Amino acid sequence: MNLKARGLKRLLSLLVAQTALVAVFAAPVSAETLMDALAQAYTANPTLNAQRAATRATDESVPQALSGYRPQISGSLDGGRTAGRTWRPGGARVDSDAWTASTGVTIQQNIFNGYRTRNGVRQAESGVLSARETLLNTEQNVLYDAAEAYMNVLRDFAILDLNRNNVQLLNEDLRATRERFDVGEVTRTDVALSESRLAGSRSDVSVAEANLKASRAIYRQIIGSEPTKLVPGRPIDRLLPKTLNAALDVGHAEHPASLAALHAYDAAALQVRVVQGELAPTLSVQGNVSGQVDDAYSSGAGTGLGAGSANGTTNSVNASVLGVLTVPIYQGGQEYSRVREAKEILGQRRLEADIVRDQVRAAVVSAWGALEGAKAQIIAAQAQVEASGIALSGVREEYRVGQRTTLDVLNFQQELLNARVTLITAQRDRVVASYAVLQAIGRLNTERLGLKVAKYDAQVHYDQVRDKWFGLRTPDGR
């Protein structure tokens, strides 16, 4: 076997190994699936858990608003000593010394306050609904980020393997070129070209390693663990609407960001009523019970009627029930300004709801276009890989018989590598784009994906705290 045949055989064997790397997106390599990663992110992602805590905090606004229906009870206790000396006409002096103590309990119950309590409760409930929709939006954003991070690791790992294999291929190519140079079949220029391509390929390996490290770091940040051997992800087309118009309809009706904006608008409208209620009369009932004990002593000295002494203890108990009607007349104009402010905020919330709807529509159209583009790119990349492989084989045959140069072989080899990288990237984009469409229409959640994970139910905490009259501990014991 001559030098050309031996070199060609080595190169073809490496090309076969390189071609097999493209199958990394089509054949399972371990039991760690994309759905497992999404389930872990749903449970452990700190951004999502922080938003859940924020939602629980918003739940407390309802019992705070309901407190306006409940009585307010306060107690008081005071005590002390007083002493005094008085001079009367004629020179008489009177000394007094008294110990006093009193205690009381006051109960005040609101009867009417311009419907501020009722509207405040409704406003708080709208805020809770808005917070829940914001939580759902955060959930789907985290799930999308997790899917993207998972596919990025797969992509970068496959590209790194392709580049490493290309280094081996170019090493074999350089060795074969040097052997041919030694026997005078090629020139020093051919050897230099092979060395240049090998150096460039090693640089590409370094870049690919850096990209993979970055992707692994983001994976750990979002999902909460280091990626090991990942099973190739698959598109979720079965969960998507059939047409773009259907996707737009779903996004308009169901996207949690839109629903959160609408609930925020409702809360702003109720805030206008709450502030307007400050201009209305208030009526309340106030009950008070108090007791007082006085232990007094007095003495007189001198001449005349002031001489003598007296002491004694007195006890008293008082109780009262009062109806209190307060009619605001003018408090400097603050309430009127706050009403105007609330109306402006209401207008702002209306515009923000329109903005969010437009953003959702743009996101659906963009994600749908990206998905269609990724599908077309895969078809084109597959055709490019197949054609580049055939062209490279032909060029090598022509090179073997002296009809092609070393540069021709290296160029076609690089073209095949680029085509395979493009195919891997398109396969990654195809999967991520399907998740992007599901996110854009507001359906990227545990139920749609069928994740095997305990679903977080915001209603549970709400029911636990809504009617609590007292208590410092949270439902989880803190």
Image (tube, rainbow, N blue to C red):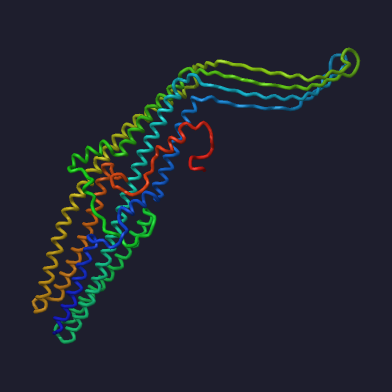
Q: Give the vertical position of 138 relative to 159 (above or below).
A: above
Please give the name of the residue rendered at 18% of the width and 80% of the height, measured from the top-left corner: 177
- Towards the viewer: 463 or 96: 463
The quarter in which the N terminus is drawn is bottom left
Q: Residue furthest bottom?
A: 183
Q: Position of residue 39 (x, y in %)?
A: 35, 51
Query: Which x, y percent locates residue 434?
Result: 23, 49
Q: In the visual, does 40 lie left or right of 354? A: right
Asked whether 37 or 455 is in front, the reply is 455
Give x and y (percent) for residue 242: 18, 43
Whether 222 is drawn above or below 158: the answer is above
Residue at 69 percent of width and 27 percent of height: 78
Q: What is the x, y in percent for residue 386?
A: 13, 64
Direction from residue 452 to residue 277 in the image, left or right: right
Q: Is residue 246 above or below residue 420?
A: above
List the single residue furthest toward the top.
305
> On the rendered structure, is 186 left or right of 97?
left
Image point (20%, 50%), residue name: 371
In the image, residue 302 above or below residue 261: above
Q: Quadrant of residue 96?
A: top right
Q: How many marks?
A: 0
Name the side, left or right, on which 478 lies relative to 299: left
Residue nearest the observer in this picture, 106 or 186: 106
Could you say which is closer to the camera, residue 385 or residue 17? 17
Q: Quadrant of residue 149?
A: bottom left
